[in-house]
Image (cartoon, rainbow, N blue to C red):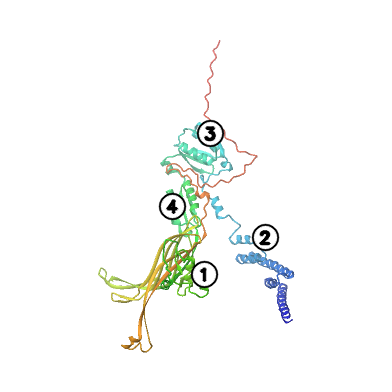
């Protein structure tokens, strides 16, 4: 009976505690302190999750608290306190995530905070401001409709005029323009491509004079220098390096008038419309978000002498990283079980380094003589060097000699100090491949201060013990590589003997002895790269585009963005231009003889 009574008492106490939490929630709700009510009701529901009464109270308090925070947010937004209003909206959404109106109000508040109505994204603005072949020319939707023109033994001037009538553009001709006879088919091509083809056949180029006027000029070097149109455009880079981008445009396009704006990470180019459009296409391709990699690094300093006592050798063989294995007749589970029973896992002839790096590495970490030097997680973008420095800055004196007087012999010593990083220094530069492999350019240095020496009469100059490795390795995403072999030797002589007697001048050697100890340590380093983000390319980025030659106008096939298709009105279909043919000869009437 006593155990049953104890259980009943405990249940009663739990019920009282739950009831007290629920009553505290009711009191807070009556005070309109809905946040406190949500907290108290949550305690009650946590203790009795099946209590419907408690769950309804929690739901009611959450809705009222969300409405209170939304009301505060509206008041703050009216007073211009947009940041505080957004915080209140976030609290309201956390309490009532199913409310669609809260998300809309939060978005509108964010828009007002940024200074206006919801505007276009940067990608949409780039598409709308993309360089066109005919800047400043007002072309209607009909310019994108395919034309049906065919010219046989036709005049070049008349061909231009017929092309202009199809889109409502007037062509004017340079005084040096010479008419000629051409043969060309312009079927199922839009206006811009037809104009380029006509300019190529007639060896002319064009420049926009007004929104409805285009001038046709003979394609000669002199005319291009005098009349070729120039445009200026500024490109704001988001990810690409400014200097590399300018060098790329100068080499590929031959552009010389490019000015960098380092403060805004932008560049301004002055060139022909077709070259500016080509530069825009190239910038869109190279200005991609760089891949990011996080490299997990763990550096251990192990006692090589002790490992040799147990028959374990750490070498850099042809296999990946450290190799490890177990002799025939012994399994990994047996080794672990012996270790759990207190037996030594480093027993001689028990292990041989062959092909199990995980087992050996765990054994190295469990050794009491192993020191963990560093365990950083380095995150960096592709091509950028991540650095980690663990240790001290040791001053190193540097003496230079300067002349006492101008033109004299350098004999006055001047001493300055350089500071050297002593400890663990790591430099890692990653590069992400398209097959999810990661190449790591690694530089590791482990250094320490050795004994001071005297050089050229100068005492207490520091010396350093340094172990360095420089390597380039390629790993899969998540693959661990183990590097070892940075061995360091330390020799130490110890003196031991009977207290008192060992310190006697002559007889003390009979009661003492010297012991020489040689300790070898090795640096074991593990590297595990993780790809966090990759550069995204589209099929449009991989396509080539035509630039033409240096003397002829560029065929304006850049930037290659699909045109916006505008629905064609049915009431007023665009007129179809009839082919222009040379006039047929008028037959001369034959005179009728008079009777």
The circle on residue 100 is 2
- Gap in Å between the C-alphas at discs 4 and 1? 62 Å
The residue beneath circle 1 is 334
Q: Give whichever of discs 4 and 1 has the lower sequence position.
A: 4
Circles 2 and 1: CB atoms closer than 8 Å: no
- Gap in Å between the C-alphas at discs 2 and 1? 61 Å
Q: Give whichever of discs 4 and 2 has the lower sequence position.
A: 2
Q: Residue furthest top?
A: 595
The residue beneath circle 3 is 150
Q: Give whichever of discs 3 and 2 has the lower sequence position.
A: 2
Q: Residue furthest left?
A: 408
Depth check, front residue: 314 or 84: 314
Query: Alpha-carbon neighbours of circle 4 within 10 Å: few (<14), some, or many (≥20)?
Result: some
- Gap in Å between the C-alphas at discs 3 and 2? 58 Å
Residue 586 seen by the camera: yes
- Point out the frontmost of discs 4 and 3: 4
Q: Is residue 489 left or right of residue 585?
A: left
The spot of residue 284 in percent (x, y) is 50, 52
Which quarter shows the N terminus? bottom right
Q: Quadrant of residue 513?
A: bottom left
- Gap in Å between the C-alphas at discs 4 and 3? 41 Å
- Gap in Å between the C-alphas at discs 4 and 2? 48 Å
- Gap in Å between the C-alphas at discs 3 and 1? 88 Å
The residue beneath circle 4 is 248
Q: Give whichever of discs 3 and 1 has the lower sequence position.
A: 3
């Amino acid at each position: 009976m006593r155990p049953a009574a104890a259980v009943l008492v405990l249940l009663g106490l739990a019920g009282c505690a739950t009831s007290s939490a629920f009553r505290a929630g009711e009191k807070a709700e009556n005070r309109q302190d809905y946040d406190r009510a949500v907290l108290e009701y949550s305690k009650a529901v946590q203790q009795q999750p099946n209590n419907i009464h408690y769950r309804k109270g929690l739901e009611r308090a959450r809705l009222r608290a969300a409405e209170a925070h939304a009301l505060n947010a509206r008041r703050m937004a009216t007073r211009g306190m947009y940041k505080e209003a957004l915080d209140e909206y976030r609290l309201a959404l956390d309490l009532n995530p199913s409310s669609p109106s809260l998300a809309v109000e939060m978005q509108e508040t964010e828009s007002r905070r940024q200074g206006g109505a919801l505007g276009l994204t940067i990608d949409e603005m780039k598409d709308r401001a993309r360089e066109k072949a005919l800047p400043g020319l007002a072309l209607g939707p009909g310019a994108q409709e395919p034309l049906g023109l065919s010219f046989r033994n036709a005049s070049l001037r008349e061909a231009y005029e017929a092309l202009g009538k199809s889109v409502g553009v007037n062509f004017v001709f340079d005084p040096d323009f010479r008419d000629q006879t051409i043969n060309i088919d312009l079927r199922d091509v839009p206006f811009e491509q037809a104009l380029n083809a006509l300019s190529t056949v007639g060896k002319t180029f064009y420049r926009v004079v007004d929104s409805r006027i285009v001038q046709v000029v003979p394609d000669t070097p002199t005319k291009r220098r005098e009349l070729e149109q120039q445009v200026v455009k500024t490109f704001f880079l988001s990810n690409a390096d400014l200097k590399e981008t300018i060098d790329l445009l100068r080499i590929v396009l031959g552009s010389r008038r490019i000015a960098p704006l380092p403060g805004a990470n932008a560049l301004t180019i002055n060139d022909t419309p077709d070259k500016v459009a080509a530069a825009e296409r190239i910038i869109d391709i190279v200005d991609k978000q760089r891949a990011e990699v996080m490299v997990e690094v763990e550096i251990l300093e192990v006692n090589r002498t002790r490992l040799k006592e147990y028959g374990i050798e750490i070498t850099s063989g042809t296999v990946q990283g450290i190799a490890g294995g177990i002799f025939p007749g012994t399994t990994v589970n047996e080794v672990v079980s012996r270790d759990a029973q207190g037996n030594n896992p480093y027993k001689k002839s028990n292990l041989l380094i062959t092909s199990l790096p995980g087992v050996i590495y765990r054994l190295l970490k469990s050794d009491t003589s192993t020191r963990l030097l560093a365990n950083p997680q380095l995150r960096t973008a592709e091509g950028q060097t991540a650095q980690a420095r663990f240790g001290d800055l040791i001053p190193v004196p540097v003496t230079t000699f300067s002349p006492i007087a101008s033109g004299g012999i350098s004999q006055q010593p001047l001493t300055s100090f350089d500071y050297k990083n002593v400890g663990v220094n790591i430099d890692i530069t990653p590069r992400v491949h398209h097959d999810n492999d990661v190449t790591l350019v690694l530089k590791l240095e482990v250094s320490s201060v050795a004994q001071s020496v005297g050089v050229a009469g100068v005492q207490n100059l520091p010396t350093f013990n340094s172990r360095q490795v420089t390597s380039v390795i390629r790993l899969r995403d998540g693959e661990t590589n183990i590097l070892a072999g940075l061995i360091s030797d330390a020799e130490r002589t110890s003196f031991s003997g009977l207290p008192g007697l060992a310190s006697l001048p002559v007889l003390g050697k009979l009661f003492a002895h010297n012991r020489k100890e040689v300790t070898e340590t090795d640096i074991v380093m593990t590297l595990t790269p993780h790809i966090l983000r990759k550069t995204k390319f589209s099929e449009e980025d991989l396509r080539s585009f035509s630039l033409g030659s240096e003397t002829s106008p560029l065929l304006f096939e850049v930037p290659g963005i699909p045109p916006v298709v505008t629905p064609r009105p049915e009431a007023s279909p665009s007129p179809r231009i009839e082919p222009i043919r040379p006039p047929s000869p008028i037959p001369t009437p034959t005179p009728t003889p008079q009777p």
